[in-house]
């Protein structure tokens, strides 16, 4: 079996195919879009990994790489499920399930790992790594506030393990209007970035680029409702092509790149390694994943320090895919 650089764990190279829970209707929807969008490089020889998920994981909606445990990832269910955090490893094996106590999964859509605090040395901060869970979904843009839960990163356990985690909670709003967000990542300095998912239009009805908002690390100690700050926009225009809606984002382990995925593409941006902020002056590289990613694929994470990406999809039997995408070329 081939081995992925940076993990030392073998995974089988298999042909991506329909899985029992896929459903003819969903596969037909995906098939209708194959070939409609040719933007981006098609990854060569993607590696499919069977996810041996516990029964509770039915709408895998995110993916994030552990800060302290090589080869361990965390994920969550989409909205309307129990408030559970799931761990799995690079072979697809389940590594435990934790209930986030006192939380409600109203519209969980994002997960990221990062430092729990902003004081002290980098080593001390990351030794106490946290998982951030985004109650960031807002399909009809009606909810005036959204929330982020933060829990200590749990140690991976054996399949079948059940535990509990006590969260901190940050409630926030946007400065202009409610937004639907499924892409979130945490910078090395503890700042948190949110990227809008859906089509937005300006006053002339022209489609707008995706917006990037920031919640500073200091927001966790605020005593009042926090307002996110609009810091940028991306050269991704939701709604400008079929399936061009942003569903996840991930900061690389060295914080030099941010992967932003839609249903059809993965965009890889250069980033400032101190602040995690995307450098829009560097054109992103783009991978086209529509031909082999099954509907409905939403999650993206970095596959360790290998430079590869891990893609996840909804459905308990949905395979994960490890892909190579080119990195953006920084201008000298």
Image (tube, rainbow, N blue to C red):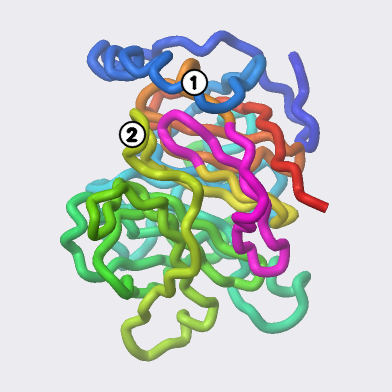
Residue at the bottom extreme?
223
Camera-side mark, 2 or 1: 1
- Where residue 125 sits in the image (x, y, percent)? 69, 73
Label total for image? 2
Q: Residue 186 is drawn in which quadrant?
A: bottom right
Residue located at (54% from left, 36% from top): 266
- Marking on residue 58: 2
The residues colored magenta run 261-286
Residue labelled with disc 1: 38
In this rendering, the answer to whether 207 lies above or below 101 is above
Q: In this view, does 314 lie to the left or right of 28?
A: right
Label 1 element class: loop
Crowdedness near tag 2: few (<14), some (14–19) or many (≥20) residues, C-alpha within 10 Å? some
User: Visible in this render: residue 320?
Assistant: no
Answer with mark 2 or mark 1, whichever residue precedes in sequence.
Answer: 1
In this rendering, the answer to whether 107 lies above or below 217 is above
Query: Is 276 a magenta residue?
Result: yes
- Name the foreground residue: 187 vs 287: 287
- Where residue 20 sits in the image (x, y, percent)? 35, 13
């Amino acid at each position: 079996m081939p081995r992925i650089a940076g993990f030392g764990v073998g995974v089988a190279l298999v042909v991506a195919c329909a899985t029992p829970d896929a459903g003819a209707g969903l596969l037909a929807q995906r098939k209708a879009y194959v070939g409609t969008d040719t933007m981006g490089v098609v990854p060569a020889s993607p590696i499919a990994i069977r996810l041996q998920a516990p029964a509770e994981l039915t709408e895998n909606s995110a993916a994030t790489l552990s800060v302290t445990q090589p080869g361990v990832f965390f994920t969550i269910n989409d909205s309307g499920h129990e408030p559970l955090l799931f761990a799995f490893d690079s072979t697809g094996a389940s590594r435990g399930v934790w209930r986030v106590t006192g939380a409600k999964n109203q519209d969980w859509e994002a997960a990221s790992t990062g430092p729990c605090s902003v004081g002290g040395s980098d080593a001390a901060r990351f030794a106490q790594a946290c998982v951030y869970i985004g109650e960031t979904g807002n399909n009809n843009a009606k909810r005036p506030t959204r929330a982020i839960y933060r829990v200590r990163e749990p140690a991976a356990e054996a399949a079948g393990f059940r535990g509990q985690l006590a969260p901190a909670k940050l409630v926030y709003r946007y400065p202009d209007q409610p937004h639907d967000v499924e892409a979130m990542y945490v910078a090395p300095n503890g700042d948190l970035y949110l990227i809008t998912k859906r089509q937005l239009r300006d006053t002339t009805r022209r489609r707008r680029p995706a917006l990037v908002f920031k919640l500073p690390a200091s927001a966790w100690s605020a005593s009042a409702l926090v307002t996110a700050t609009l810091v940028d926009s991306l050269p991704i225009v939701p709604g400008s092509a079929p399936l061009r809606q942003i569903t996840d984002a991930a900061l690389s382990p060295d914080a030099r790149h941010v992967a932003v995925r839609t249903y059809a593409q993965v965009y890889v941006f250069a980033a400032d390694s101190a602040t995690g902020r995307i450098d829009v002056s560097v054109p992103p590289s783009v991978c086209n994943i529509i031909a082999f990613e099954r509907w409905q694929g939403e999650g993206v994470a970095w596959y360790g320090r290998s430079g590869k990406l891990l893609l996840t999809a909804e459905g308990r039997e949905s395979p994960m895919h490890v892909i190579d995408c080119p990195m953006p070329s920084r201008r000298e």
